[in-house]
Image (cartoon, coloured by chain):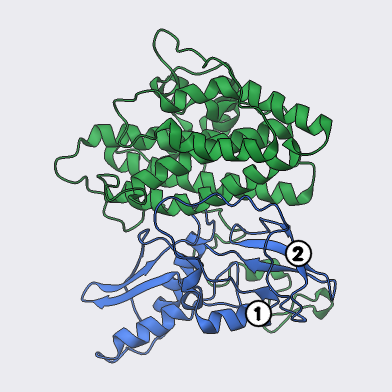
Amino acid sequence: MVTAPVPSGQADSVAYDVAAGTPDPELPMLTVADLGILRAVDVTADGVLVTITPTYSGCPAMREISADVRQRLLRAGFPRVTVATQLAPPWTSDWITLDGRRKLAAAGIAPPSPVPPRSGPVPLTLRLGPPQSPSCPRCGSPRTRQTARFSATACKSLHRCEACGEPFETVKSL
Amino acid sequence: MSTLDPSAGLDDTGHDSPYDLLGDDHDDGHRWAFGTGFTDPLEGIDTSVPAGLDADALARYCLALGDDALIYSHRLQQWVTRMPELEEETAIANIALDLLGQARMLLARAGAILGRTEDQLAFFRPEKDFRNVRLAEHGDRDFAELVGRLLIFSTWRLALFERLAGLESAMGAPDPVLAAIAAKGANELAYHRDYAAQWVVRLGDGTDQSHAKMQAALDVLWPLTGELYRPDPGALAGVEPAAVDAVIDEVLAVAGLERPDRAPLGAVSGHTGRDGVHTEAMGYILAELQSVARAYPDAAW
């Protein structure tokens, strides 16, 4: 494969755009930048250093994301790519971009609600009524209920719309 | 883009099976399912030990916290395909996955100091070198024990991780890697605790039978809680029983359950799980967890 050399000076923004465009394997309608897991792209004399952060500790897609980012940069003409993990500060669903939220909703997944600010220990949530449930991403009805706190992936919960009857997922606030 | 319609036959990428597409972006041909290849969960993170910190003590403590998560995760994995409803199945599988992720990072953190990989630590250590608390290895006999044990474990571990992350006070763990693992894990543990608490309330405040089973489960589990607050000279953070009790008592009050009055499970010649002295159940867990890796030590997957 022949790749065009990247003109120096533009390398930083080109490398960022290439890395940022990598789709997330679990939520392929979002890029890693939309999801907020791409933390930094640095172009140095030693090559491109991409820093990513996991959504959840056990996220099984980290290796795939790392391989995808590396392949995209190699194809774009960056011969040396290093992908590093960063844990602090931990990922929060608040980092999902506005564009990412629109794409989630368009794909039938309700975007997460803002994480409430807190200091000190996490308070126990012992809701005695039905848990909060987001509006239906298909018909917009607020009459929805949570059917499970966990769904097919760790980052989502499962809901059902009482108005249109459709089940849907939401990205949990974390 | 490709189509997954089997009637479409060969698509424009030249593949005749959608599964062929899964490896398309890679030259290593590894992607046939997520999680089938492993990289260091701390890839690119500076794992040098801060000056003035005892590296061996840090490794031992990370092993202890990692073993708690690894063994507990294995116990939860044993429930997969056995849960009463699909929704609870996905919940337990997700909680087990979170804990496995925490275990991998903590074992990798210890391994960076000890010069061993996470797999070597998980699969090739004998029972006496596992430092998990005995609560982690308990085999839940019914759903009430499962949610009761998860409430106790996640409440305690969340309080501990908040300390290590510096969320509780200005002072976090003296090691920034451990502090970062704890900060990440705390968010997950809060979800685990809320899930368990809501089930304990539902069962405790449910029918006569569910109430009786939930109370019986707490009675069985209570002796295992004493070890959580045992003075551990190797610990880098401690949790006051009162901080955990306040949360559990709130749940028990709403659930209409009694706080059991049971003596803690004793130490054996002064030793408990943190010292590598375990209950009988531990041998069976390790036999299942380690047998494949030990039979095929050079296998790659």
Q: Is residue B301 visible?
A: no
Going by the image, does B191 lie left or right of B91? left
**Residue type at mark 1?**
Ala
For this rendering, which residue is in front, A7 or B276? B276
Q: Secondary structure at mark 2?
A: strand
Provide the residue designation for mark 1: A105
Taking the view exactly as shown, the residue that stands out farthest to the left is B52
Residue type, label 2 = Arg
Q: Nearer the viewer, mark 1 or mark 2?
A: 2
C-alpha gap between disc 1 and disc 2 = 17 Å
Colour given to chain B in the rendered image: green
The reply to whether the C-beta atoms of the residues labelled 1 and 2 are less than 8 Å apart is no
Residue furthest top as drawn: B269
Chain A as rendered: colour: blue
**Sequence-first tag of 1 and 2:** 1
Viewer-closest of B149 and B76? B149
Residue B173 x/y as whole percent: 29, 44
User: Residue A106 falls in which quadrant of the image?
Assistant: bottom right
| Mark 2 chain | A
Residue pictured at 58% horizontal, 23% vertical: B222
Q: How many marks?
A: 2
Q: Residue at x 42, y 27 (%)?
A: B229
**Quarter of the image with the N terminus of chain B in it:** bottom right
Q: Chain of mark 1?
A: A
Percent from the top left, x then y, of residue B168?
A: 36, 48
| Residue B195: percent from left, percent from top | 64, 48
Position of residue B249 relative to residue B40, above or below, is above
Query: Which residue carries the number 2 mark?
Result: A145
